[in-house]
Image (spheres, rainbow, N blue to C red):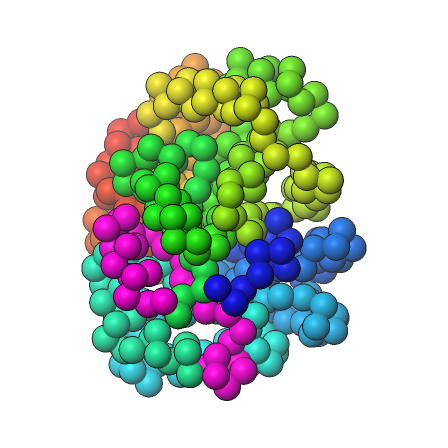
Amino acid sequence: MSIDLNVMPKLGFGLMRLPEKDGKIDIGHVCRMVDKYMDAGMNYFDTAYIYHGGASETAIKEALVDRYPRERFMLATKLPAWEMRERADVERIFNDQLHKTGAGYFDLYLLHSVEDGSNYDTYVKYDCFSFCMKMKEEGKIKHFGFSYHGSPELLEKVVDAHPEVEFVQIQMNYLDRTNPVVRSQELYEILHARNIPMIIMEPVRGGMLAEMPPEIEAKFKARQPGMSVASWALRFAASLPGVMTVLSGMSSEEQMDDNIRTFTDFNPISDDEMNIINEATEQILKVPQIGCTGCRYCCDGCPANISIPDVFRTVNTLRRYPDDWRSKNFYSQLLGRSGRASDCIACGQCERVCPQHLPVINLMKEASEVLD
């Protein structure tokens, strides 16, 4: 592999959940976060063509590319299969990304969400692997890989058929190790056995692992009094052999500060800490949760304008704390900017783009019964 594990910072700045103000990305806030991150000696930024409805790539141009010398940072973005209708779209999207970011080239470039079915078939149909290698030859891509949300069986097929792939980005957190849909541990073992470097996404599972029931939080705090609950999830992912970077989709300076603390003088998870994590995992899994990570891919194009991740967040909280009135209060406030769960017309667009493969339509029916 030509990519050097030691070049990448352990903490990557994911640009999918940037802070917003009045419905738009708050550029001033993002600039402050970029500066803190860079001042801490870290420099890897991960965006995508579809993040924030297409505005993330433009935002990082303003907050990073226009403000720092190009050689000081590494920028990654992704090619989305679902935005392509013909082969010409591949080059069109790529050139649009170069224009929107102003980066000149991409340090890492990924095929977005390779998975069984239409996404992978589209990348094959339009010869996207060859296109990316051509861009690499032209110096417009430094390193090529893909993000992955499919089965272990397909992953083996893809990496064995494409030795040109230099890295793979997978979802991994301590809760999803045995998830029968995500199958994170199996994906990790396939890549680790082949010495393919990994980037980790969703280490805190869309924020779910940043907030714990009191009894679990007490165990974490007793072992590491000065560290946040979220830091345990980040340290777990970053401690895995073969992982070069762990992405965190930070939305505030407070999250940035906490994550920088976690990765400054980084301490891998110890054996006794791993025992605590395993106990926490077992306890969390006793209460079934909707496995939404809050990526919000489902929100763009929802004809009923339902903030689906926030609805699921409310249901999950009610499952864990059925007597807490604040969940339904949150839902009442949500309706000022979102449709009701009962407004779902079962069009299925959300299910087609959900990287977690959730049965959103049925879950919305359940949410409606509970909330409406």
Q: Position of residue 257 (x, y in %)?
A: 72, 42
Q: Position of residue 94 (x, y in %)?
A: 45, 78
Residue depicted at x 67% and y 22%: 224
Can the viewer see residue 331?
Answer: no
Q: Position of residue 54 (x, y in %)?
A: 48, 67
Q: Who is closer to the viewer here, 138 or 284?
A: 138
Can the viewer see residue 182?
Answer: yes
> Is residue 363 placed above or below 98 in the rendered structure?
above
> Is residue 321 placed above or below 177 in the rendered structure?
above
Residue depicted at x 39% and y 70%: 164
Q: Position of residue 256 (x, y in %)?
A: 68, 45
Q: Who is closer to the viewer here, 188 or 264?
A: 188
Q: Quadrant of residue 222?
A: top right
153 in magenta? yes
Residue 219 relative to residue 81: left or right? right
Q: Which stretch did the figure color magenta?
A: 135-163
The quadrant of the picture occupied by the C terminus is top left
